[in-house]
Structure formats: C-alpha cells, structure tokens
Amino acid sequence: MSLTELLAALLSAAGVWLTAKRQMACWPVSLIAAVLYGWVFFAARLYADAALQAVFCGCLFYGWWQWKTDGSQGDATLHIRPLSAYTASAGLLAGLIGGGLWAFCLARFTDDPTPLADAMLSSYSIVAQLWAARRHTASWLMWLVIDTAYVLLFLTRDLYPTAVLYAVFIGLALQGLLRWRAAEQADQRLG
C-alpha cells in the first residue's frame, strides 16, 4: 500500500459520496482522485484501468460542465433524467464492443495479467460515468455490478486499500441508487 493509493482511495470515496448527494464538489474531488489512481494502476500494470483514469478525467470535466450548466437556471436542485431504452441499449452495446476491442489490444500488446476483466470493467465504467454525468439513475445499478467485480480484480492484484474502497463504493452506489430514485420520483410528482 502506498500513500498515493490511500489518498486516491479517500478522495474517490469522497467523490462518490458527494455524487450521491448531488453536490457539485464531486467533480473536482473525483478529478484529483482519477489522476492519482492513474499512477497507481499504471504501477500495478493494470493498463486499461490506468487509461480509464485519463478517460475519466475527460468524463469528469464533461459531468462538471453538464451539472453546472443544468444547475445555473435559478434552481439549485439537479434533477434526475430518465434513461431511454435506446440510450440504455446503445450504452450497453458500446461497452461490450469497446471492452472487446480493448481486451484484444491488452492481450496482444501488453503484459496485463487480466486483459478481459480489466478491459470490460473499464469500458463499462465509462458508460456508467457518462450516465452519471447525464444524471441517469441506472448509472448506480451499473456501478453496483462494476464495483463488485472490481473488488475481486483488485484483490488478485494485491491492491487491498483499493479493494476495500470498491467494497465501500458498493455501499455508496446503493445509497446513490436509493437517493436518486427518491429524487426521480419527486421530480415525476412535480412534473
């Protein structure tokens, strides 16, 4: 365990907790965590997860912009948006195709010990992050599955603080799901 990994874990947990509460501070906190985790994962030879952190930085800037733009209309509450069947299907298919291509590249060109798991989890994490940026409650369902699988992956790579973090993420994702569902129902009653 390194100090960088521990700091990244703490900031990541804070970022997810702030996201569940729909607090704008989630974006800069998560951005710092992503940069730190990029280094941690590269050192652990989890190249897809290291690259994922760079993609997350772009997604975090996008989410930050989305929430700032949507929250600037005089209403401090950020409303949940429904996820259409088309968007859900397109996201799941994009995750599958992207993960498959990424796994092929990792297996062929790197020494990643778990290219398929690394690539698929990374690919679907991008989908979940984009859904969170667009404020779709389904992002939390996807995070529940992803985080559970990540706990197992990180245990195999001896990244114990990160495995514990992702176990905490499971609880935070459940909290986020419940909070966002309640907010979504409140929005529907008002709308």
Image (cartoon, rainbow, N blue to C red):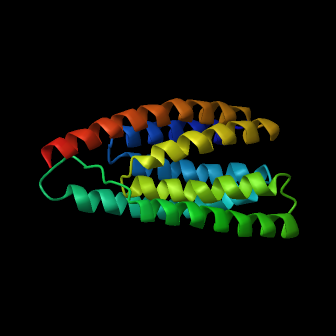
The location of residue 155, given as percent across then percent down, is: 77, 35
Q: Is residue 184 left or right of residue 176?
A: left
At a point 44% along the width and 56% down the height, the residue shown is 131
Residue reaching furthest to the front: 85
At a point 24% along the width and 59% down the height, the residue shown is 70
Q: Quadrant of residue 169?
A: top right
Look at the picture and state if 82 lies above or below 102. Answer: above
Tell me if residue 80 can be seen: yes
Tell me if residue 61 can be seen: no
Q: Quadrant of residue 83?
A: bottom left
Number of numbered labels in the structure image: 0
Q: Nearer the viewer, residue 93 or 31?
A: 93
Q: Quadrant of residue 56?
A: bottom right
The location of residue 11, given as percent across then percent down, is: 51, 40
Q: Nearer the viewer, residue 59 or 147?
A: 147
The location of residue 133, given as percent across then percent down, is: 40, 56
At a point 42% along the width and 60% down the height, the residue shown is 85
Look at the picture and state if 52 lies above or below 171. Answer: below
Q: Is residue 5 left or right of residue 60?
A: right
At a point 44% along the width and 64% down the height, the residue shown is 87
Q: Is residue 12 left or right of residue 132?
A: right
Q: Quadrant of the N terminus?
A: top right
The location of residue 42, given as percent across then percent down, is: 74, 55
